[in-house]
Each structure stands twice: as C-alpha cells, then as structure tokens.
Image (spheres, rainbow, N blue to C red):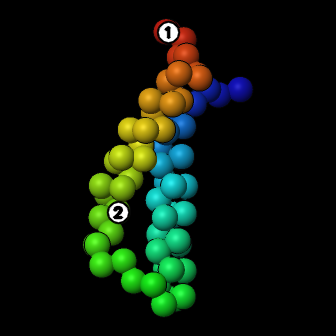
Amino acid sequence: MDKISNEHRAHDLAIAALDFEANRRIASELNGSHDSSPFDMYRYYFKAYESALDAVNKDFHQEQD
C-alpha cells in the first residue's frame, strides 16, 4: 500500500474545507444574506492547509526513509 504524506493529507483537507466554505457562501447569498468581505480563495486554502497540517502531524507521524 502506498503511503501518503502529511502534506498530501493536509492538502486534501484544505481543499474540502475550501469547497465547503465556497458552497456555504453561495447558499448564504441565495438565501438573501450578503457577506461584504471578499472571499480570497488562496488565503482561505493556505490557512486551512496550515491548520490541517498541524493537526495531521500530531496524529500521523511520518517514518523517516
């Protein structure tokens, strides 16, 4: 079985969080709410990635080759 890196795990989680947030904002606008702050996808991804990487590193210890 191929191992995935913690960075890959964190990336996957960040992409899922980004998708969730984008859909939440779209649904909110369709329901009449409007968030006046611009949505910076890169900044949101990067913050989600950093948070996910910290959490993943605590749970998945990478073996050194």
Q: Nearer the viewer, residue 41 or 27?
A: 27
Residue type highlighted by circle 1? Asp
Residue 65 is tagged as 1
Which residue reaches farthest top? 64
* Left or right, 44 with reference to 55: left
SS class of the residue under badge 2? helix
* Left or right, 2 with reference to 15: right
Identify the residue at image location x=49%, y=9%.
Answer: 64
Residue type highlighted by circle 2? Met
Q: Is residue 28 above or below residue 20?
A: below
> Would residue 6 be visible to someone looking at this image?
no
Residue 50 placement: quadrant: top left
Identify the residue at image location x=54%, y=46%.
Answer: 13
Residue 20 is tagged as none
- Give how far across and how far down residue 44 sits, in percent: 36, 56
The span from disc 2 to disc 1 (Cα, nearest Å) is: 34 Å
Residue 41 is tagged as 2
Q: Is residue 10 above or below residue 33?
A: above
Residue 3 placement: quadrant: top right
Which residue reaches farthest front? 33
Contact (Cβ within 8 Å) of mark 2 with mark 1: no
Q: Earlier in the sequence, mark 2 or mark 1?
A: 2
Q: Mark 2, mark 1: which one is toward the viewer?
A: 2
- Give how far across and how far down residue 30 sits, in percent: 52, 88
Identify the residue at image location x=54%, y=11%.
Answer: 63
- Give how far across and how far down residue 54 sits, in percent: 44, 29
